[in-house]
Image (cartoon, rainbow, N blue to C red):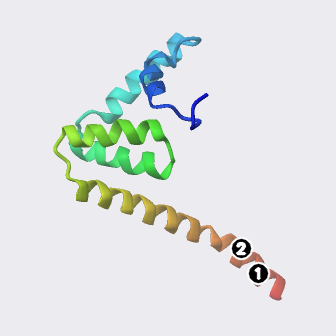
C-alpha cells in the first residue's frame, strides 16, 4: 500500500481517462489542447495560470505536470511562486467576498 492517496505514477494514466467513454475523452482532450495552447496568451502564460489553478484546486497530478512544464519553458522559481500567490490571493478574496451572504443575514437579524 502506498503512503499517500495520490501516486505520481498515476499521472501517466491520465491519457486513459476516456477508457469507458471514448467520445467524451476525445472531446475533452481536444478542448484541453485548444485551451492550453498558445493563442492570445502565450503557452508560458497559460502554463503559469494552470500551475496557479492546480495549486488552489489542490490537484497533485496537475501541480506535478505544470511545475515540470514551467521548468521546461524556463519559468523561474520566483515566477512560479508569484503565480501561486496570485491564486492564493484570489481564493482568499473569493472566500471573503462570500462573507457578504453572512453579513447580509447578520444585518437582517439585527433589525
Q: Residues within 10 Å of mark 1 (few under 14, many from 20)?
A: few
In which quadrant will I find the N terminus?
A: top right
Say above or below: 48 vs 99: above
Instruction: Determine whether the residue tagged by mark 1 lies in a helix, strand or loop.
Output: helix
Where's residue 15, x and y in %? 43, 19
Where's residue 48, x and y in %? 30, 48
Where's residue 100, x and y in %? 64, 73
Q: Which mark is residue 102?
A: 2
Say above or below: 95 vs 22: below
Residue depicted at 34% across the width and 27% down the height = 33
* Front residue (pair 85, 1): 1
Q: Residue furthest bottom?
A: 111
Q: Which mark is residue 106?
A: 1
In the picture, measured across the screen, residue 52 lies left or right of residue 69, that is right
Quadrant in the rendering for residue 30 = top left
Residue depicted at 57% across the width and 13% down the height = 21
Give the Cα distance between marks 1 and 2: 6 Å
Q: Residues within 10 Å of mark 2 (few under 14, many from 20)?
A: few
Quadrant in the rendering for residue 42 = top left
In which quadrant will I find the C terminus?
A: bottom right
* Front residue (pair 65, 93): 65
In the picture, measured across the screen, residue 14 lies left or right of residue 70, that is right
Amino acid at each position: 500500500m502506498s503512503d499517500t492517496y495520490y501516486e505520481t505514477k498515476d499521472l501517466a494514466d491520465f491519457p486513459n481517462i476516456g477508457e469507458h467513454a471514448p467520445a467524451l475523452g476525445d472531446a475533452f482532450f481536444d478542448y484541453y489542447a485548444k485551451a492550453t495552447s498558445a493563442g492570445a496568451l502565450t503557452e508560458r502564460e497559460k502554463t503559469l495560470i494552470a500551475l496557479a489553478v492546480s495549486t488552489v484546486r489542490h490537484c497533485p497530478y496537475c501541480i506535478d505536470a505544470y511545475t515540470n512544464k514551467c521548468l521546461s519553458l524556463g519559468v523561474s522559481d520566483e515566477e512560479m511562486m508569484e503565480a501561486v500567490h496570485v491564486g492564493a490571493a484570489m481564493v482568499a478574496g473569493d472566500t471573503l467576498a462570500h462573507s457578504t451572504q453572512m453579513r447580509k443575514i447578520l444585518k437582517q437579524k439585527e433589525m
